[in-house]
Amino acid sequence: MTMLLNVKNLSAHFSLPSGTLKAVDGVDIRLHEGETLAIVGESGCGKSVTACSIMRLLSPPGKVVAGEVLFQGTDLLRLPEEKMRRVRGNQISMIFQEPMTSLNPVLRIGEQISEGLVLHRKLSRTAARDEAIRLLAQVGIPSPAERMGEYPHRLSGGMRQRVMIAIALACAPRILIADEPTTALDVTIQAQILGLIDRLKQETSMGLILITHDLGIVAERSNDTAVMYAGRIMEYAATDELFRNPLHPYTRGLMNSLPQSAEPGSRLQTIEGQVPNLTGELTGCGFCERCPDKTWICGKEPPPMTEAGTNHLVRCWKFA
Amino acid sequence: MTSPLLETRNLTRSFSVRPGMFGKPLLLKAVDGVNLSIAAGETLGLAGESGCGKSTLARLLMGLLPPAGGEVFYGGAPLSAMGKEARLTFRKDVQMIFQDPFSSLNPRMRVGDIIGEPLAIHGMGRHRSRILELMADVGLSEEYFDRYPHEFSGGQRQRIGIARALAVSPRVILADEPVSALDISIQAQIINLLQDLKRDLGLSYLFIAHDLSVVRHMSDRIGIMYLGKIVELGSGEDVFKRFLHPYTEALISAIPRIAPGTGRHSVVLKGDIPSPFAPPSGCPFHTRCPYAEPPVCSEIPPPLEEKEPGHFCSCHFSSRLFR
């Protein structure tokens, strides 16, 4: 399978008055055609910053400080901004959690979809309009021609997310990055939207990076999974393998703390403590403060990424 | 069955909303003829999608909103006819925990003052020792007494909110999405805390959440709401394993699971939740129901009936579909 994206040693830092916050610290991920890579983790783990760094959408005080983002062989981090603009929205697209804030409230949805078509695909106004109607139909919006003239506030959350997807797919991108695409939606609508994204992915064989905090979505919708904690990937494996055989104490802790994993009413397992402060020097493993299995070395040296099986990488001293 | 502590009979509340400045006001039936009861020591879970009326129901139960029809009973007495004394007792006995730990705490008050405020209001003496005891109960260390809310994470703030609710020794806690803003690992800590407090203090909960696996974990009985109505009500086992309503089936089927491929068939509903301004005729769910049979479902509203002992459902065809 063709590799679409190869991210090597990506680091992104935020310069804050209180010090340098290492939001992303040496992340490696790979994405192949037609595959879904899930990036999962709790708030502040660096999953969204990773996505924004790939798209070069990080704004100060955030800055990518190291690494390569190879898209079909080209390092996106070294492209001049002008060329990057031709990649963004055209070859790599992104959809966000809150469809209300990522759509322009004063533009009709027809104009918002046509914008990319005119800009990237050089379509005429009328051709763009026809194509926009086709796209709206493709994402399952009823009576698409009439909907073209609506403003975003007239649509429900699920419909807005469909419009976002139509915009993101307007130029038939090779990669779609979906950052918590269904977190703001109800469960029945979530199932519709995830099904839609899956279907469109299969039709176009694009690669999908699915960023989520929901392990259930990860298990059901992805091929590979990267579990992030405190700016680093802690475990990276084929999704089936990860759920069958989770190795990292953090991954295991997350899975065990879900109510789904326990008998109703029983005591849930928890991960004690809280996420460490990422400003300042993090010596050793980012998880060691909360880790039930920590040993003397964990707080001293950061563990290396270790191959613990076929398609299974883990960053933990237990397996190094 | 023990007599219910908190009960609603045919509770109804609508809101009049004017679209734009000149539009004709529209009537939104947020809660439509709801009958529920919470026994002492029981957790009643309430699940449903946004706009189904679960938060309005909580506010009606708190007495924060007057009902348009029906009645709330506390200890058998109707809320509307309560005298000043009884009402004060009710206000002390029924407390609330909110979803957003960031907007439900006064940013200019110190933790000790936030937790102590209900004690002062109810004239129970704002003693430092009592506040420290409450802080210990919810797992907050003594040194936080003089700190401000902004210095805490979401999980810690939720603990402060819980301590505040517990301050006046309530009997019922209405918890509106208490863990949905929290990360998974923190969510588990708060769920355990709520379970411990229930056991130790003999509390009753109304536990509202959109996450069905959380509701299932917390609740003895579960009510499923759709467009202002209870469509199914029963024990956790009844509702999850032996559901009788197609909407419940769809909700449970839509939960993303970490153990996939367990042979469940996935029901994906078509369409959006209908606008509560113009709820469908007949059964409110018929526009999205995969089994709907016009004209029965589109014309006749199904009553909420006890189909099995303690298991209520409002569907014309439940027995044919699921048994």
Image (tube, coloured by chain):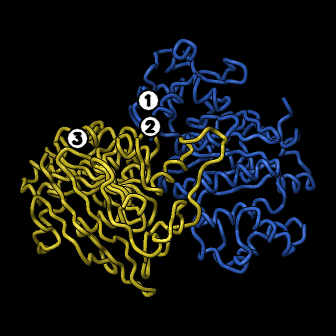
The dot on residue A200 is 3
The label nearer to you, 3 versus 1, is 1
**Amino acid found under the numbered disc labelled 2:** Ala
A90 on left or right of B309:
left
Residue A92 quadrant: bottom left
Read off the chain for label 3.
Answer: A
Which residue is painted at 82% across and 54% down in the image?
Answer: B170
**Extreme residue in the bottom direction:** A17
Q: Where is A80 relative to A308, above or below?
A: below
Asked if residue A246 shows in the view, the reply is yes
* Residue placed most toward the observer, A237 or A113: A237
Regarding residue A151, the answer to whether it shows in the image is: no
Q: Colour of chain B?
A: blue
Mark drawn on residue B259: 2
Secondary structure of the residue carrying numbered label 1: loop
Image coordinates for residue A234, horizontal then vertical, percent = 38, 60
Chain drawn yellow in the picture: A
Report crowding for label 3: few under 14, some 14 to 19, many 20 or more residues within 10 A (C-alpha): some
Residue at 43% of width from left, 29% of height from top? Answer: B262
Q: Are marks 1 and 2 in contact (CB under 8 Å)?
A: yes
Q: Is residue B59 above or below residue B48?
A: below
The residue beneath circle 1 is B262
Q: Which image quarter holds the N terminus of chain B?
A: top right
Q: Position of residue A135 (x, y in %)?
A: 20, 43
Q: Amino acid at mark 1?
A: Thr
Q: Is residue A28 left or right of residue B286?
A: left
SS type, badge 2: loop
Q: Quadrant where the C terminus of chain B lies?
A: top right
